[in-house]
Image: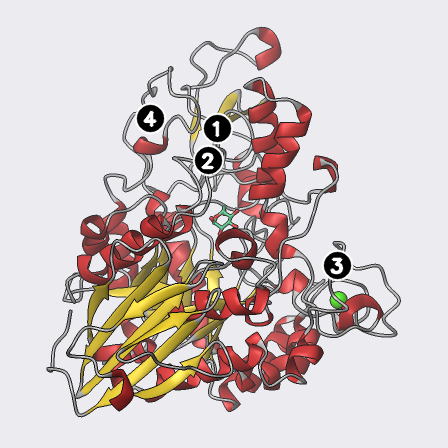
Amino acid sequence: MQRTRWYKDAVFYQIWPRSFCDGNGDGIGDLWGVLGKLDYIASLGVTGIWFSPLYPSPQADFGYDIADYYDINPEYGTLEVFRQVLDGAHERGLKVIMDLVVNHSSDECAWFAESRSSRDNRYADWYIWRDGKTPGSPEEGGTPPNNWDSLFEGKAWEYEPARDQWYLHIFAKKQPDLNMDNPEVRAEVERIMRFWLDMGVDGFREDVITYISKVEGLPDDNPLKPAARGMQFYDHGPHVHEYLRQFRRDVLDDYDCMTVGEAPMISAEKALEYAEEGPDQELDMLFTFEHMGADCLFTDWIPRPFDLRSYKQALGSWQTGLGGRAWNALYIENHDHPRIISRYGSESYRVESGKSLACSYLFLRGTPFVYQGQEIGMTNTHLASVDESADVSTFNQHRLVREMGLSEKAALWLVNRATRDHARTPVQWSSAPGAGFVGGDGTAEPWYPINPNYPVINVAAAEADPHSLLAFYRAAIALRRRLPVVREGGYRELKRASGQLYAYVREGAGQRLLVVCSLSPKTAYFSAPADLDLAAGELCLCGYEDAPLEGNAFFLRPYECRVYLWEDAGEEQVC
Ligand code: GLC
Ligand code: CA
């Protein structure tokens, strides 16, 4: 099968199904809801959909704990409805990629139910089971096999009396890690891939895929580390490349599909080991995190004000760091991060900062992803107490900072800054009761409270306003798709030292594109270099209604952004 690398021209829209649109009136988003919104999605100009997990799941981590890899969660629909969504998407020119979560399954997956039941059953070796360091149950004084922490819920090990052994869970207790070293598990992963690809899906977003291979012997980590002990022993583990190459060779190469791997804590240099184009390529692109930490030190728990220079540095290092040898995945929101306007922009300049943030990433080299609600500028919600959270990782962070001695008030402040709940409130479709999210007669209680700002921030209101953020996203996506320079061109940053502006030039394919974004509430000033004659360029986008020039320069109003284009310019080059 010849891979066409169609994904290089793609723009994806991410659906987190529980909160996208409820079709059947029970207050939970579902595939019937998606069916009714396919025209809306296509109207954005995007060319694909990434579905966060749709599979049957006890929802301990909202689908990232899969109980059955070959079916659809009954709350969301059936395989039949999924096929309708797939066909409807394809008819509209939209590709569909599924979330593939194979570092771990749910503890309610049939494989785990059997695996935990004894030491000698068909699935006995499908998970990572070890004897305790000291024998017996925790009540009898037994201790876990090593000192690793889980990322979501206390220690990384849980005791199972039926086996008198412990299982590893890097995430929540209900997310036992699969033993990828077992060839049967890898064969099962391949079956799962083929099942969905044969149905017609166009690829996968592979969840924490850099975690699938654990260091032999599972040694103790430095006990003095404050949290996340063990990560170095499973991130980029010894067999990860071998396994990913196997999946590519055995399955993925038979389809004209694409893969994007989630890769926390990775450098551009390391990314090439996974995504460098060539015979040994494993993944088509990676979701990386550096640019998402421009408002925190080390971890989400030590916040600082948004730092534009770190944001630019992170984005720029990936634009140039891959050296044209691998492809980027571009995003500023997803289901794991607070809303970007509340984080990096300004709720007081909601639409303006939303436009400028959109420009800051949509014209970079790579495949952009837009998260549901991002295109209308949804903002963070507010939790009056941690009990209002629905997120297993939020409870963990709250507990950890309380244990570190923080007051409840301070802990709640941190929760409100970092919780994933912000991204998971229902999409605001209209000012009707239930925000147009709740289907049927609209009277059901939504599964999670709708952000009270829905009468103002909603799709219907944005549709009626030609200057809305939604209109801007449509224009920006259309522009991106029309210009070969965005795919082909090199990347050059201007005004690197500026603490207000992010400015970059894309050059190539006979075009030159200048993107200037203010990420500041104060007036800023941009003077163009001599080789960019602003008056001769075409103003393609502007976050405000007019775009006055002062010679070969301009003042930017709060969070203003502009994009200029010169045709028949720029060298053929790839960055
Ligand atoms: C990824 C997902 C996140 C999930 C975690 C464990 O980071 O994006 O939502 O909680 O993996 O599966
Ligand atoms: Ca529903």
Residue 156: assigned label:
1
Mark 3 or mark 2: whose residue is earlier in sequence: 2
Label 3 to label 4: alpha-carbon separation = 43 Å
Which residue corresponds to mark 4?
218
Q: Do the residues labelled 2 and 4 touch (CB within 8 Å)?
A: no
Which residue corresponds to mark 2?
170
Which residue corresponds to mark 3?
450
Dot 1 alpha-carbon crowd within 10 angstroms: few under 14, some 14 to 19, many 20 or more: many
Q: Of the residues shown, which amino acid type is indicated by label 2? A: Ile
Secondary structure, mark 2, is loop
Mark 4 or mark 1: whose residue is earlier in sequence: 1
The answer to whether any part of residue 365 appears in the image is no
| Above/below status of 386 relative to 495 | above
Q: Nearer the viewer, residue 272 or 340?
A: 340
Secondary structure, mark 1, is loop
Q: Of the residues shown, which amino acid type is indicated by label 4? A: Leu
